[in-house]
Image (cartoon, helix red, strand yellow):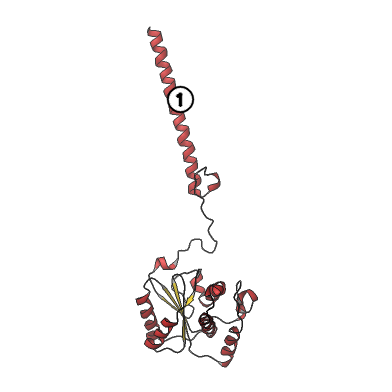
Amino acid sequence: MKIGRRMKQGAAAMACVMALTGCSAVHSSAGTVLQHHAAGDHHDAGAGAVPQPNPNPQQTGQASAHHVASAHAVQGGVALEGENHRNTQITMNRELADQLIQEVHLGSTYVAMTDNSIYVAVDMGGTKSDKAKAHALNKQDAVTGAGLFGSGAGAQMDWRTAKPLAPETLNGIKRILTRIYPDSRVYISTNANFVERLMFYDMQQRSNKHMDAYLNEFNTMVQYVFPNGAS
């Protein structure tokens, strides 16, 4: 009887050891899967893993600026914080442009609205040569692909030269826009080519053309006008 009892006790002990060993193996396997998740390797993560998108090299390590600051202004192509200008929609806001003209006493002004940003083009005048080159852009109805930049014409234009706005003018523009759209980023430029192109968009919208057709071109253009905003 004692032997039988000892045999039963021994079998129970072996079963317990085997059970513990099995549990250890399961936890070890789960630990391996978790390590793959942490490394972002969804191919070896096993069933039920959520694939992680591969980051764009230009976006790696960067935060979307509208999450960093509620609102600020950028003038003459100088950005205060990084922004990728990866807009997914665009529309011209004639009423807002007219409001800026009246309240801040501006010349011809054009306003483009996107997902989280407002782009303002203020006409400060320019040389006849600048105006002639800029006006030539308006004759090119580039609505497909990268537009002017796909054809190579846009890359040859000067998108950086801009006359500075007076501090009170800049602050006036920013004050109005951030009051109405407190979470938006504000970009302002007086570059002649930028002014002419936004004027062109404004005319196209008035002619009932869909602005999304110019989206790729616009995103490329603002990278040129506000390069620091894409760094």
Residue 224 higher or lower than 129, as above or below:
above
Where does the image place residue 68, in percent across and percent down from the top left? 40, 66
Q: Residue at x 55, y 92 (%)?
A: 127
Q: Residue at x 39, y 86 (%)?
A: 169
Give the residue displayed 42% in from the left and 82% down from the top.
Answer: 95
Q: What element carries label 1?
A: helix
Relative height, residue 39 to residue 30 (above, below): below
| Residue positioned most to the top | 1
Residue 50 placement (x, y as % from top left): 49, 49
Q: Hey, what amino acid is under mark 1?
A: Met
Residue 156, quarter of the rendered image:
bottom right
| Viewer-closest of 104 and 156 | 104
Q: Position of residue 2 (x, y in %)?
A: 37, 8
- Residue furthest to the left in view is 179
Q: In this view, does 17 lie above or below 219?
A: above
Where is residue 142 drawn, in percent x and y?
60, 77
Vertical position of residue 212 compared to residue 158: above or below: above
Between 158 and 131, the one nearer to me in the picture: 131
Assign the N terminus to one quadrant of the image: top left
User: Which residue corresponds to mark 1?
Assistant: 18
Kindly indicate the quadrant of the structure image that contains residue 130: bottom right
